[in-house]
Image (cartoon, rainbow, N blue to C red):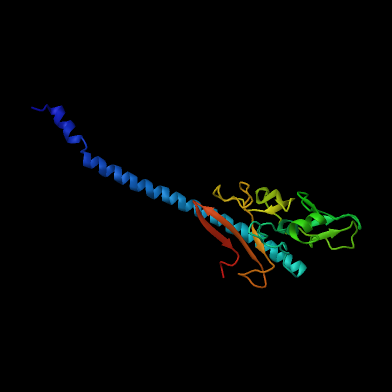
Amino acid sequence: MKTKIQKQFSAAAFTLIELLVVISIIGVLAAFVIGGVKIASKIKITSTAKAELKFVEAAIENYKTKYSSYPPGNQRAATATYDPSIYNQLYYELSGVTNSTPPPSLANFKTLDGAAIINETQCKAAFGVGGIINVTKGGGDDGVAAQNFLVGLKANQIYKNILNNLVPTTVLVTSIGGPDLANQPFGVQDANPFHYNSLNPTNNPGAYDLWIDLVIGGKPYRIGNWTAK
């Protein structure tokens, strides 16, 4: 015969089925929470990428206003192992450079922010062009001054010493990295560049294609300047 305490304990105890139901509910709720966190993270990543792309777009359009043409793209030929769209000279053209070296000496192009320098021989080897358009020449006041169209650019939006045909170059990158570690276009972690094509754009004929390729949770995403169209 059960005592009063034993009866109270039996009435308050959970059955195995009730425990399984509770565990299942907790599992479902956890799945919703984890899924919601992943969605929020994806939205934050893609929103950041879009904002940074708009920033570079605005710089390109301001460049176009001043020079009546878009920044030149890498003119080296694409191969199975070389993508000229990621090895572009956007950073140099949009940052602006100075060249105070008188001819016939080798021209040295130093960015206005002092962060990078490249000479004309290296330009030819890396980008297939002989120099930078957005440049201040000489030390006098008679030349057109170069302009920095990337005012407000953060340190984590450039990556230095990317080897381009054995030339150390600086490129514009997105601050969010791959973001998956496996997404390394240069074989370097967190160096995810802006792709730029003004020579033969397929999405914006007569203008330029600008885009970022992301990998989020193993899935590829492309943020481009033609998506709104």
Residue 149 lies, in percent from the top left, at 73, 59
- The quarter of the rendered structure image containing the C terminus is bottom right
What residue sits 64% from the left and 55% below the top? 193
> Residue placed at 43% from the left, 51% from the top?
36
Residue drawn where x is 26% and y is 42% of the image: 20
Q: Where is residue 113 in the image (x, y as percent from the top left)?
A: 76, 51
- Left or right, 65 with reference to 140: left
Q: Residue at horizontal 65%, vertical 68%?
A: 201
Count the labels in the image.
0
Residue 64 in percent (x, y) is at 73, 67
Which residue lies most toward the left here? 1
Q: Answer left or right for 132 relative to 85.
A: right
Q: Residue 30 in the image: x percent, y percent?
A: 37, 46
Residue 152 visible? The answer is no
Q: Which residue occupies the foreground of this view, 175 or 85?
A: 85
- Residue 11 in sight in this render: yes
77 over 2 or under it: above or below: below
Q: Quadrant of the N terminus?
A: top left
Figure quadrant of residue 134: bottom right
Task: Examine the image and state in which quarter residue 87 appears.
Answer: bottom right
In depth, the one of 199 and 82 nearer the eye is 82
The residue at the far bottom in this view is 206
